[in-house]
Amino acid sequence: MSTAEPLLLYIETSTEVCSVAISSSDVVLYRKIVREPKAHARIIAPMIEDLFKEVGFGIEKCDAVVVSEGPGSYTGLRVGVALAKGLCFASRKPLISVGSLDLLANLASDIVLSQKSSQEYSGVESIVPMIDARRMEVYTATYTKDAQRLTPVEALVVDENSFAVLLSKGVTLFCGDGSAKVSTIIDHPNAKFLSIDSIAEGMVKRAVTKFREGLFEDVAYFEPFYLKDFRAGVSKRGPLNMKSR
């Protein structure tokens, strides 16, 4: 392996957005993003095949596979992790995981820190990525403006008093697909909202660091971080009518 310039394959399926990418060290060489709800199982493998066709090599040239570990969509995470593990087993490559909220925080931090002169994001002290769960619930945690996590990941039902203490301390940037519904509830002068997708590029910095430090997952036993147990939806048609014989 080339620890100086690792070639990494990324798979991100924690939300309705499917994203794959390849990086050399921290430079993203190629990427593919598809926004198609409930299509993870059908489109993610062909996306990777297309990506390898574009770069002109296969998994054998990559130094590791990186996958978003969750929390997020139960089905999306299951599909992404299963594919990542399959690639690792077949190629004998190591597996790296990056938290889904961590990658969102990285994406938001890059925007905040690259726009220091921008009035829109000036003064941001905290970043709160949010992944949509059911109703008014989100998966979330609090980060510094340079994407260092300060609080544990949690499933939170948001109301008008949520994050009141954090907002009283300074400007807070809420981001991710869960922040849209939160913007209709939290009304505070220190609250800012950023619409960004969960995409593979948000994993690059942490993945490269983990690769260089040898922080790999056990491919045989690694499972997504669902945070909550899966609940199957109830059919709107109600229970099946059983005819007596």
Image: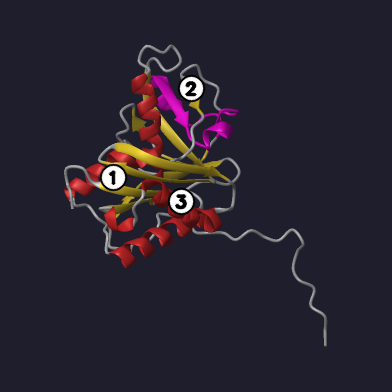
Identify whether 36 is placed above or below 149. Answer: below
Structural crowding at the residue carrying mark 1, measured as other residues with C-alpha within 10 Å and reported as few (<14), some (14–19) or many (≥20): many
Q: Which residue is mark 1?
A: 207
Residue occupying image coordinates x 18% and y 46%: 212
Task: Specify whether residue 211 is in view.
Answer: yes
Asked if the residue under mark 3 is in contact with the one under mark 1, i.e. CB atoms within 8 Å, the reply is no
Nearest to viewer (mark 1 / mark 2): 1
Tally the marks.
3
The CA distance from mark 1 to mark 2 is 28 Å
Q: Which residue is mark 2?
A: 192
Q: Could you say which is closer to the camera, residue 65 or residue 7?
A: 7
Q: Which residue is mark 3?
A: 50
Q: Secondary structure at mark 2?
A: strand
Amino acid carrying mark 1 in the image: Ala
Task: Specify whether residue 142 is in view.
Answer: no
The span picked out in magenta is: 159-185
Tell me how the rendering is colored: secondary structure
The CA distance from mark 1 to mark 3 is 22 Å
